[in-house]
Image (cartoon, helix red, strand yellow):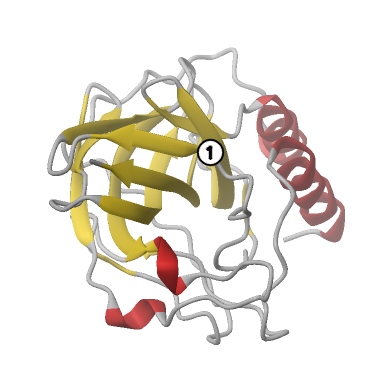
Amino acid sequence: MPSRLAALLVGAIVVESCSAMASPSGTTPSPIRSQTPTASATVPSPSAPASLTAAVATTGASPVAVTDGCPPGQEGLVASSLALERSLRIGSTRFALVTAGIQNRSGDAQADDAIAAWATLTNETPTVSAAAGSTGRLAGSSALRLLSGTLAVFPASAFDLAAGRVPDSGSVPTTALRAADGTLAFRFPPTAGRWVLAFGVNWQSLCIKGDGVAYAFASTR
């Protein structure tokens, strides 16, 4: 990836996303990544180095049509990336989406950057309130459709963000999420408590597509 493109895309991620939390161990962890078109994924280990490849799944999705108005090439990828609203929502609660692999849907340019696990999770990350065991729906902006994804749920008590303590994410199973109308349905934990929801998503807009991660707190009753 040309250095100029990398710099611009990384700058876009920093500007558009919430303030990133540095890896507490001083290493660069891996993000949640979909590994297959059926949205199977492994939640990142906070101590594992990142090694990323773009993989966008379309199972269960309704793709947005590509138009002739999409800017081409690397400059077009930068322009489309800068214009992308990097946030997801559950109901009216919004939180940051951090993108990793990204490419023009025409296939003429792409970029891929490592992102840290728990990159946007802070004590100020929004909390979603819901009934235990109820169904939630993860959505993007009107211009961003979700194609597939995964969810891993952690007890919030496993985190001490001020002290830089995070759990070993490899011990928590992931659930594959399938898309319907550009959104992803999921289940909140079946018991009352406070949780961290770790989403890995594959997404697309009119001109570009890619993958990324997002985190939210959840309070179930």
Name the image quarter holding residue 50.
bottom right
> Closer to the camera, 187 or 111?
187
- In the picture, measured across the screen, residue 163 lies left or right of residue 104, that is right
Residue 139 vertical position relative to residue 167 in the rendered view, above or below:
above
How many numbered marks are there?
A: 1
Name the image quarter holding residue 155.
bottom left
Q: How crowded is the residue under tag 1: few (<14 C-alpha within 10 Å), some, or many (20+)? A: some
Location of the N terminus by quadrant is: bottom right
Q: Position of residue 30 (x, y in %)?
A: 52, 74
> Closer to the camera, 39 or 216?
216
- Secondary structure type for disc 1: loop
> Closer to the camera, 58 or 68?
58
Residue at the (46%, 46%) spot, across then down: 216
Residue at the (67%, 79%) spot, across then down: 24
Q: Where is residue 106 in the image (x, y as percent from the top left)?
A: 50, 34
Location of the C terminus by quadrant is: top left
> Closer to the camera, 76 or 30?
30
At label 1, the amino acid type is Pro
Residue underneath mark 1? 126
Residue 68 vertical position relative to residue 134 in the rendered view, above or below:
above
Residue at the (58%, 84%) spot, across then down: 49
Q: Where is residue 107 in the image (x, y as percent from the top left)?
A: 51, 42
Residue at the (43%, 19%) spot, across then down: 92
- In the picture, measured across the screen, residue 6 lies left or right of residue 98, that is right
Name the image quarter holding residue 133.
top left
Q: Position of residue 174 (x, y in %)?
A: 24, 65
